[in-house]
Amino acid sequence: MDSAARMRDLIVVAGRLITLVNEETRLLEAYKTNDIGQLQDEKTRLSRIYVGLVRDLKRDPELLAAVEKAVREELTDVLKHFEAAAEANTNALNVAREANERVMRAIVEAATAQQTTVTGYSRTGTMAAPTRATAARPLSMTVNQRL
């Protein structure tokens, strides 16, 4: 495959990744995280191709030098757009993660506040005062940290 074709492939793949990353960002910002999964197979496939093409370019910088100036400029432009889309996506992922963590903390705090203490009876037959150990009984919870 000639240099121009490889650079065109890189431009096309990066352009498609930009579209997918922007769509993922839009879904994150709309709190439609359940819909993101349908993008992942295509995103993974394109990412592998992208990595391979970029690796070839880094290994053989002559590839870029061998193509026309217009193609190099188009590639530079598309890679800038890809970087901006990736940064916006990272920001959206961080916001979504922070929101999920706040929700989980609120749930844990609410569950802890609702937890009743079991005290039982004392030796004299009266209700025993809760000890520090029974008053602060731990709450067990499992959280899926994948986003």
Image (tube, grey):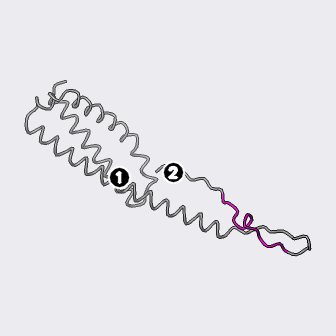
Q: Which residues are magenta?
A: 127-139
Numbered badge on residue 36: none
Specify whether 97 is left or right of 67.
right
Work out which residue is located at the far bottom of the displayed protein and give it. 126
The quarter of the picture where residue 25 lies is bottom left
Residue that badge 1 annotates = 90
Q: Is residue 132 magenta?
A: yes
Pointer 2 local density, CA inside 10 Å: few below 14, some 14–19, many at least 20? few
Local crowd size for mark 1, using a 10 Å CA cut-off: few (<14), some (14–19), many (≥20): some
Q: Indicate the position of residue 93 as horizontal and vertical percent values.
A: 39, 54
- Residue 94: where, in percent of width, then height? 40, 56
Q: Amino acid at mark 2?
A: Gln
Question: Is residue 90 one of those drawn in magenta?
Answer: no
Residue that protrudes farthest toward the top in the picture: 1
Quadrant of the rendered image containing residue 117? bottom right
> What residue lies at 43% left-to-right and 52% top-to-bottom?
35
Q: Secondary structure at mark 1?
A: helix
Q: Which residue sits at x=21%, y=31%? A: 57
Pointer 1 or 2: first along the chain: 1
Residue under label 2, please give it: 145
Residue at 29% x, 43% y: name it.
Answer: 17
SS class, disc 2 = loop
Q: Which residue ends up furthest to the right in the rendered image?
A: 124
Spatial separation of the CA atoms under disc 1 and disc 2: 16 Å
Question: What is the x, y in percent for residue 145?
Answer: 51, 51
Main secondary structure found in the magenta portion: loop
Residue at (22, 34) in percent of width and height: 9
Q: Is residue 137 above or below residue 37?
A: below
Tell me residue 126's x, y (percent).
88, 75
